[in-house]
Image: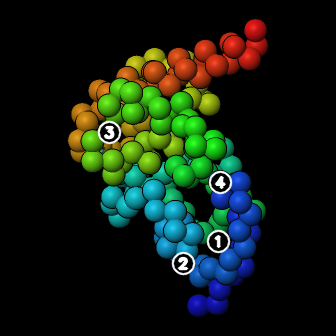
Amino acid sequence: MAKKLITVTVNGNKIEQAVEPRTLLIHFLRENLNLTGAHIGCDTSHCGACTVDIDGQSVKSCTHLAVQCDGSEVVTVEGLADKGVLHAVQDAFYKEHGLQCGFCTPGMLVRAYRLLQDNVNPSEEQIRAGMAGNLCRCTGYQNIVKAVRHAAKTLQTAKQAVAA
Ligand code: FES
Ligand code: FES
């Protein structure tokens, strides 16, 4: 099938590539760009291991075509740290032991990153509901909830420090 040229900004880098219309975004990221943090855990759009941020929304990249991202801004787990300094969600998952095998973690982190921009101070219930699109086989979720709370506090403290 004829390829289509797309321009997409991924983690701040502008990329121009020709892609087949049927290419799923997850495969474009992993195979074309070698961004292998996002994972594939299912073929029915349930697990959320493939979650990335597109134009300010969490999206399961296994159910999105690369051609649909023409002109979009995409953030993957590799784009969360800033010059080697971990983002608050990464630091919090580390501190609260919110991961074991790590397979769900890139998707969890990118989802938590967006959740905390949409709701700066989520309750436990809101965190569980907000992360419901992401499955984990290892943690039982408890420490993931703690990690998202931890990250929320860190981000709030940082905001107050800037405002003061
Ligand atoms: S790989 Fe499972 S939802 Fe995308
Ligand atoms: S840490 Fe193993 S699946 Fe979540």
- Give the labeled residue for mark 2: 22
Earlier in the chain: of badge 2 and badge 3, it is 2
Residue at horizontal 61%, vertical 17%? 156
Three-letter residue code for mark 2: Arg
Residue at horizontal 68%, vertical 77%? 17
Q: Quadrant of ligand 2?
A: top left
Kindly report which numbered mark, 4 or 1, lies closer to the viewer in this rendering.
4
Q: CA distance from mark 2 to mark 4?
A: 23 Å
Q: Is residue 27 visible?
A: yes
Q: Judge whether 132 appears above or below 40 on screen.
A: above
Q: Judge whether 83 appears above or below 125 on screen.
A: below
Three-letter residue code for mark 3: Leu
- Give the labeled residue for mark 4: 11
Q: Judge whether 6 appears above or below 164 on screen.
A: below
Dot 3: within a 10 Å radius of its alpha carbon, few (fewer than 14), some, or many (20 or more) residues? many
CB contact under 8 Å: marks 2 and 4: no
Three-letter residue code for mark 4: Asn
Q: Is residue 129 visible?
A: no
Q: Secondary structure at mark 4?
A: loop
Quick check: is the Cβ at mark 3 less than 8 Å away from ligand 2?
yes
